[in-house]
Image (cartoon, rainbow, N blue to C red):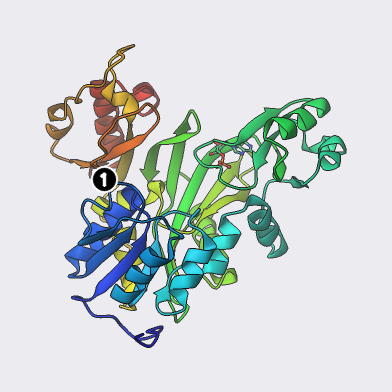
Amino acid sequence: MTPPARDGPIPPGEWLGLLGGGQLGRMFCMAAQSLGYRVAVLDPGADSPAGSVADRHIHADYLAPAGLARLAALARAATTEFENVPAEALAFLGRSARVTPAAPSVAIAQDRIREKTFLRDHGFGVVPFAVLATEADAVRADAALLPGIVKSARMGYDGKGQIRVGRHADVAAAFAAMGRVPCVLERFVDLACEVSVIVARNASGETATWPVAENRHRNGILDVSIAPARVDARLAEEARTTATRVAAALDYRGVLCVEMFVTRQRELLVNELAPRPHNSGHYTIDACVTSQFEQQARVLAGLPMGDTRQHEPAVMVNLLGDVWFEDGAAAPREPDWLAVLKHPQAKLHLYGKAEARRGRKMGHVTCLAPSLDEALRVAAAIKRALGIPGADELA
Ligand code: AMP
C-alpha cells in the first residue's frame, strides 16, 4: 500500500476521492476537475448527481470494504459531502489517505447532543437546551425551555426530526413520537434572522471565511440565501469571527458551515454545524473569487487557499421538485428554464436528478447584480415565473 500522504500538496492530475453522490458532491467534482484533478465517487446510488460527473463512480455501500479499498487504492486524499457518512468509513480511508474533514469533527457535527455540548463548553452562544436521553429526562424537562422544539440528536436535516412543544406534557409525547431516541429540547427563540458563515481551514490552521449569508427557510428547507447578509458590520464581523473560532476549536480541516441565529436582541447564537460545503454557500460559485467547492478541493489537496472575496451581491434561490409540478398536477413536467435564462445575470444550476419530487433539492439559481436590491428584484421575478412562493417577500 502507498504510504499515507498526509502533508504536502497533491498536484492536479492526481485522483481525489469523495464519499457521497449528492449535489454537493457533484459541485465538488466539477470544481476539482476544473483544477485538473480526477475524482472518484463512492456512492451506493445508481445514477447519483456526483456519480454521473465523476471520473469514476465506485458503486458501493459506504461501509463495503471492497468499495472503500478501491477508493483508497486510487485516491491519496478523500473528502465527504454529507455529515451522516459513517465515521467508520472515514476512519478506514484515514489509514492510507488524507481525509478532510477528519472523523472526530464529523462525529461531533453528526450528533446534536455532542455538537451543542461542544459549542457550549467552548464558550459559544447556543440556544438554551437540555438533553433528552430517557423518558425520565422528558418528564422532568425544565419548564424554562418552553415553548420549545424537540429535535432528534441524529439524522435530522431540513427541519426533519423536529416537533414543536408548547406545554410540559408535550415534551414526553414528542420524545415518544420520535421513537425514544436521544433528543435535545431547545427553547423556541424569537429570531430576527438566520445567517451562516462558510469557513475553510487548512492543515496549517490558516482559515478563510466568506461573506455572511442571510438565510430564509420555507417549510424547514432553505429557500433563499442573500449575500452579503443585511446585518450591521459589527454583527457580520462577529459571525465570521465565531465561525473561525468554531473551526479552530474543532481543529477542523476542510470546509465547514456554521449556521447561526440572530435574536431580536441582536444576540448571535450558533444553531448547527455542517462539516462540508452548504446550500447557503452556493452563491460563492458565481459571486466569489473562489467557491466553497474549489476551496474544499484546495484544502484536500494541500494547495494554497483561494481568495474568498465576493465580487457582486448575490441572491440564491433554491429550486425544489415542487417547481416541476404545476398547481395540483400529479405528474411532473420540465419547468420553463427560458424564463430564468432570459435574465442575463441569473446563473442556473441543475443537479441532474432523474426524478423530481416535492421538497427535493433539484437545483438553484444565483442572481447577481451591482446592488443587492437589484439582485433581489431578479430573484423575485424568477420566483414568480417558476411559481415559487414568497416572491413578494423579496422585492
Ligand atoms: P435546524 O434543523 O435546527 O436548523 O432547524 C430548522 C429551522 O427551524 C431553523 O432554520 C429555524 O428556522 C427553525 N428553528 C430551529 N430551532 C429553533 C429555535 N430554537 N427557535 C426558533 N426557531 C428555530
Q: Nearer the viewer, residue 327 or 198?
A: 327
The quadrant of the picture occupied by the C terminus is top left
Q: Nearer the viewer, residue 5 or 42?
A: 42
The residue positioned 41% from the left and 83% from the top of the image is 6
The residue positioned 37% from the left and 55% from the top of the image is 20
Q: Nearer the viewer, residue 175 or 234?
A: 175
Farthest residue, direction front: 66
The residue positioned 70% from the left and 41% from the top of the image is 186
Which three-letter amino acid code belongs to the residue tagged 1? Asp
- Residue 361 is situated, as x and y percent measured from the top left of the image, at 35, 37
The quadrant of the picture occupied by the N terminus is bottom left
**How many numbered circles does the render carry?**
1
Tell me the crowding category of disc 1: few under 14, some 14 to 19, or many 20 or more residues within 10 angstroms, Cα based.
some
The residue positioned 47% from the left and 71% from the top of the image is 92
- Residue 37 is situated, as x and y percent measured from the top left of the image, at 21, 70
- Residue 25 is situated, as x and y percent measured from the top left of the image, at 32, 55
Farthest residue, direction top: 328
Tag 1, which secondary structure? loop
Can you identify the residue that label 1 sits on? 47
In which image quadrant can residue 342 be found?
A: top left
Please give left or right for residue 229 compared with residue 243 in the image: left
Q: Is residue 18 above or below residue 160?
A: below
Does residue 166 appear in the picture of this structure? yes
Where on the image, by quarter, is ligand 1? top right
- Residue 335 is situated, as x and y percent measured from the top left of the image, at 20, 25
Does residue 307 appear in the picture of this structure? no
